[in-house]
Image (cartoon, rainbow, N blue to C red):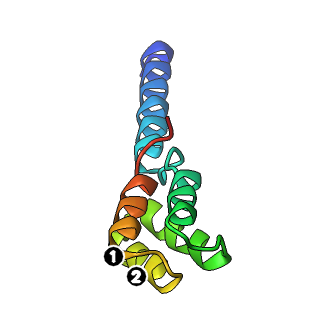
Amino acid sequence: MRTSTRTAGVLTGLILSLSGAALAAPSAHADIPACITMASQAGAEVTDAVTAACTRGVNGDLQGCVSGLTAAGVPGGAANGACRTAALEPR
């Protein structure tokens, strides 16, 4: 195999693997601070439980997020909105 062909193959493989890793990575752009802010505006005290619930929302567990925020004192509608916000990119 020629060196140029081998180099092109290695570079192509590297690019594909790096782009795949970027797509499979957890959502680094998720908006936990916005979720926490919405929960506090709804009357909840910002605690580790609120942060943990918003983190669940970032990871795609909306039901777990809503349950956690509701248990922390956030009303259901506000908890649902905050969890949906957690999954969005910050603006």
**As drawn, 56 above or below 81:** below
Q: Residue furthest top?
A: 4
At horizontal 57% and vertical 64% (from top left) the residue drawn is 40
> From where the camera sits, is residue 32 visible?
yes
Q: Residues within 10 Å of mark 2 (few under 14, many from 20)?
A: some
**As drawn, 86 above or below 80:** above
- Rendered location of residue 57, percent (x, y): 43, 65
Determine which quarter of the picture holds residue 36: bottom right
C-alpha span from label 2 to label 1: 6 Å
Determine which quarter of the picture holds residue 48: bottom right
Q: Amino acid at mark 2?
A: Ser
**24 and 47: which is toward the camera:** 47
Q: Quadrant of the N terminus?
A: top left
Mark 2 vs 1: CB contact within 8 A: yes
At horizontal 47% and vertical 70% (from top left) the residue drawn is 56
Q: Residues within 10 Å of mark 1 (few under 14, many from 20)?
A: some
- Rendered location of residue 16, percent (x, y): 40, 34
> From where the camera sits, is residue 59 visible?
no
Residue position marked by numbered label 2 in the rendering: 67
- Disc ID at residue 23: none
- Rendered location of residue 39, percent (x, y): 52, 65
Q: Amino acid at mark 1?
A: Gln
- Disc ID at residue 63: 1
At horizontal 60% and vertical 79% (from top left) the residue drawn is 49
